[in-house]
Image (cartoon, coloured by chain):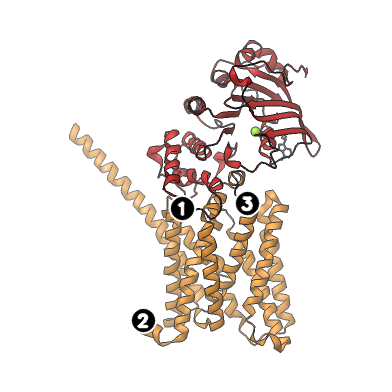
Chain colours: A orange, B red
Amino acid sequence: MIEMILHYDFMQRALIAGMIIGVISPMVGLFLVVRRLSLIADALSHVTLSGVAAGLLLQKQFPVFQSWNPLYMGMVFSLTASIFVDRLRHLYRSYQELAIPVILSGGIGLGVVLISAADGFSVDVAGYLFGSILAVGESELHVIIGVGILVTTVILLFYKELFALSFDEESAALSGIPRRSINILFNLVIALLITASIRVVGILLVSGLITLPVAASLQLASSFRQAMFWSIAFSQVSVLSGLAAAYYFDWSSGGTIVLVSVFILILVSSGKRLMHVVNRQIKSRTHSRHQEGSS
Amino acid sequence: MREIEICVKEELPDSGDFHMTKPVLRMEDVSFSYENQTVLEHIHLTLRAGEFLALVGPNGSGKSTLLKLVLGSLHPDSGNIFLFGSEPRQFREGSRIGYVSQKANSFNQDFPATVREVVASGLYGKLGLFRRMKQQHWERVNQAIEQVGLNDFADRNIGRLSGGQQQRVFIARALVSDPELLILDEPTVGVDAHSAEEFYKLLVHLHRQKGLSLLLVTHDIGAVTAYVDRIACLNRRLFFHGNGEDFSREKERILTDAYGHPIHVMDHRHEENVSS
Ligand SMILES: Nc1ncnc2c1ncn2[C@@H]1O[C@H](COP(=O)(O)OP(=O)(O)O)[C@@H](O)[C@H]1O
Ligand SMILES: [Mg+2]
């Protein structure tokens, strides 16, 4: 496989893109999941779809935009929506999850209208919906690298603030952590991450990549650092398997990535249960032996 | 309800040496209402440095609301509040106050964090943006964990501790930034009687050893009269604000006034059940 990668440009791009996404999506995903906001990823990805559709429409109508990657338009849309999410969460303090269906249905509605208004695109919209890692182009790789650097920097710089806010938002704010600004910054990071992941897993599966490896890591981790480590590890395994499946079997990369993540989740949780049972068996056996010995 | 205000004005009966020390917290004629329900009326309250004050009152009497006013997350309709001499909303030194909320125990029990990670988060606000935890900060975290007697649990997942132990984790998180004032909102709710007793002893120890000012909200009246310097009895208005002895002497009358009906307080545990 190494030779293939060295030989083909598209494989190099796919590998770099996959590894970057495989690191940043669980990094962001862990904070999203523990704050019980994983559905925000879903909502924003649907908005990104409408952005991409708007970008494609512009390309079709105005030749000036020919050289523009429609992903940029998707990014603009999801960044805007992420600020709306924050506003809506403020508006409905005790119905924070209400922001999600509002944004999600708004996004998909607009996307579908734009696609139908354009009367079909020459580009394959399915590539955006389900991802095609082997089709990552030069300019898209640049977007992914840029986003990768930005997201990693923000998460590392604000790790302690994000942790404190995730565990207990009220206390964190009272202890002097700038809650509003950090939350807005984090929403922007989510929007960037989603835009960058679309080529790899697709709009419909982005939230799977963001949450599934985290869900598996939660089965193993007792500390936040461990959770971070395991979710990145699981995510890398999933993304690389997706890449291999796309190359060797011509399977959908997004679909494979998410299926492998689900498989890891099942493996980890049943493995954990098995360990539990085995441990109990050993304990009870040594216990009964003790009793035999003493009687 | 008979409304006899016993002691609500500034000239408080002197309860020890606190008279001379600077007030950490002062509320002057504070009133507050949610949309159309008046929750607090004409509250005068002073907490001096090094003092241990218990705020008691039935459920819905406005205790948590009073704390929110003090912490600046709500704003009074009238009257003034001074926290270390400044208005709570202007107050920017959050690390001088440790706060354990009534809801502290309702966190996500499956949260992937160890005791050490949670306690450390109490330092992050003080540390400030872009500053990393250094060796001395981690030592401070270990100290705080030791103070609440959880050394053996430092690397345990917080969800795997008992309710009483979790409560102590939150005290450690509040203490780690070396606050001058510790505010606790019903910290022993949902904790068994023995752990609650241990918990009060820990508070008294911290109070004596470090000269920490304490504001403890509770409806566990029997238990606190033994430990605190002063008691304030609240039910929309303040019905008593004075020291434990005066309180004990007139307990029946004060509580009848505040609760609206006679209640029986047994010494120490198992006091009034009527409040809930
Ligand atoms: N956010 C709120 N909006 C409207 N009313 C509230 C709110 N919080 C509390 N209240 C009301 O204010 C009163 C005092 O509540 P609270 O301060 O929580 O009492 P306590 O802490 O003494 O039990 C109660 O009657 C409660 O219903
Ligand atoms: Mg309360």
Say which label, 1 or 2, has the lower sequence index. 2
Q: Amino acid at mark 1?
A: Phe
Q: Which residue is mark 3?
A: A179
Note whether B210 is above or below B240 in the view shown.
below
Say which label, 3 or 1, has the lower sequence index. 3
Can you give x and y, in whole percent of width and height, for residue B172 in the image?
49, 37
Q: Which residue is mark 1?
A: A224
Between A237 and A156, which is closer to the camera in this rendering?
A156
Disc 2 element? helix
Q: Which residue is mark 2?
A: A2
Q: Amino acid at mark 2?
A: Ile
Residue labelled 2 has its Cβ within 8 Å of some atom of ligand 1: no
Can you give x and y, in whole percent of width and height, for residue A241 in the image?
42, 73
The answer for how far apart the CA atoms under marks 1 and 2 are is 34 Å
The quadrant of the image that shows the C terminus of chain B is top right
Q: Does residue B7 appear to the left or right of A227 in the view shown? A: right
Q: Does residue B190 appear to the left or right of A178 in the view shown? A: left
Disc 3 element? helix
